[in-house]
């Protein structure tokens, strides 16, 4: 069975679409001028999403051997990709990326290390910033693998990471040859597809790789006062330094604003301190929770950076909210592409919105 990247398909669902053409240079310059103005401006969703280019890809593969894999494969996929990407592009093979003189132009450093620019005005206390990609995989899959089993996962790349995709594709192919997980279960990538862009960009046996087309967000407004939010993969939100296991609508909206601000700042049009996002959050505390059918999911993974096993968890399930949603729906619809919360590069934070009249 082919697993498709979670996206909006039903007419009743809150939809996110991408236009056939990108915005013009003149439009881009107008919004850049607006955001560079020292006078405080309101940052509505439309101008923000227009300047976060992304590309969504789906990888369809087949296992060539048997073995066992964890039911949630996000950490395994991310770890394997990071290892092979570094092996492919790194000429030093030792030391830290922060100490390397080519870190500014290195594909591995840009995609995986999250090294922030020195002149940043945002997240200045953090040594690393979120990576410019989202991993999309099933929350739970079977653990016993048989030769011939299909295997599908996907990515959403942001900003410059789109142009670096050939390095990712090559590293994925090499990862399949060596095998996935502790038992090194081998797989072959049958094809790579950009569903809403360039179509098929790679097929097994070919020595050519097509280019990705940049996609931009476009909304189709949906008037509803009641929505169901499906947590398709674990959603991990934090307040302070603590995981939130009982979340509110305000928690979700606040996390969505933060996620959008981070991605646009580092991988789209940089926002300045003149940008006021308070209107995106206003009124969220008035939206009521009607149903909460979520539960905490947790698993252990080995961290090469920390050289130890750590626990990673988040909420899965469904929640239903009711209230004045008009000003919040565009932002929440956007998070269906960007993901929300922590560990989105591990496959966490995938959500789906559905009107629940």
Image (tube, grey):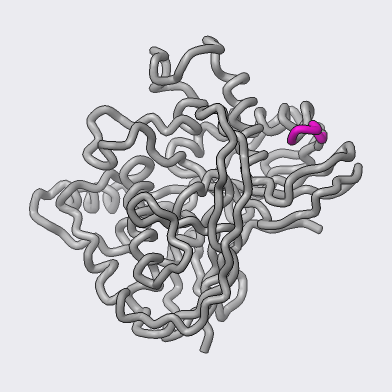
Q: Tell me where residue 230 appears, x and y as whole percent.
A: 56, 70
- Taking 208 as reference, is 3 above or below it? below
In front of the other: 111 or 128: 128
Quick one: quadrant of the N terminus? Answer: bottom right
User: In the current view of this chain or complex, which residue is farthest to the top?
Assistant: 92
Q: Residue at x 50, y 62 (%)?
A: 336
| Overall secondary structure of the magenta section | loop
Residue 46 lies in quadrant = bottom left
Q: Is residue 198 visible?
A: no
User: In the current view of this chain or complex, which residue is farthest to the left?
Assistant: 39
Q: Residue at x 44, y 36 (%)?
A: 160
In front of the other: 221 or 354: 354
Q: Tell me where residue 112 appears, x and y as whole percent.
A: 50, 32
Q: Is residue 281 magenta?
A: no
Q: Residue at x 47, y 84 (%)?
A: 290
The segment highlighted magenta reads 181-185
Q: Tell me where residue 304 appears, x and y as whole percent.
A: 56, 28
Q: Tell me where residue 118 appears, x and y as whole percent.
A: 26, 27
């Amino acid at each position: 069975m082919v697993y498709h990247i979670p996206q909006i398909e039903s007419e009743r669902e809150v939809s996110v679409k991408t236009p056939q053409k990108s915005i013009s240079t003149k439009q881009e310059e107008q919004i850049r001028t607006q955001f560079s103005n020292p006078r405080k401006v309101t940052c509505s969703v439309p101008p923000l999403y227009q300047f976060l280019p992304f590309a969504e890809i789906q990888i369809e593969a087949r296992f060539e051997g048997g073995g066992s894999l964890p039911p949630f494969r996000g950490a395994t996929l991310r770890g394997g990709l990071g290892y092979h990407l570094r092996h492919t592009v790194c000429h030093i093979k030792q030391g830290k990326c922060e100490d390397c003189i080519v870190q500014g132009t290195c594909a591995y450093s840009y995609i995986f290390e999250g090294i922030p620019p020195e002149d940043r005005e945002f997240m200045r206390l953090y040594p690393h910033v979120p990576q410019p990609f989202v991993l999309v995989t099933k929350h739970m899959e079977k653990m016993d693998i048989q030769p011939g089993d299909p295997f599908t996962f996907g990515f959403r790349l942001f900003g410059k990471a789109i142009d670096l995709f050939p390095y990712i594709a090559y590293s994925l192919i090499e990862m399949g040859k060596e095998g996935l997980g502790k038992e090194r279960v081998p797989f072959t990538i049958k094809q790579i597809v950009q569903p809403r862009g360039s179509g098929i960009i790679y097929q097994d046996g070919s020595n050519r790789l097509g280019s990705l087309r940049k996609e931009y967000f476009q909304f189709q407004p949906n008037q509803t006062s009641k929505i169901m939010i499906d947590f398709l993969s674990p959603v991990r939100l934090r307040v302070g330094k603590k995981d939130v296991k009982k979340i509110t609508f305000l928690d979700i909206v606040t996390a969505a604003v933060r996620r959008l601000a981070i991605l646009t700042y580092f991988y789209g049009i940089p926002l300045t301190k003149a940008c006021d996002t308070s209107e995106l959050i206003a009124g969220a505390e008035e939206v009521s929770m009607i149903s909460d059918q979520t539960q905490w999911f947790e698993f252990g993974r080995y961290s090469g950076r920390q050289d130890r096993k750590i626990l990673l968890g988040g909420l899965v399930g469904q929640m239903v909210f009711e209230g004045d949603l008009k000003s919040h729906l565009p932002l929440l619809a956007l998070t269906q592409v960007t993901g929300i919360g922590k560990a989105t590069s591990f496959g966490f934070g995938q959500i789906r919105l559905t009107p629940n009249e």
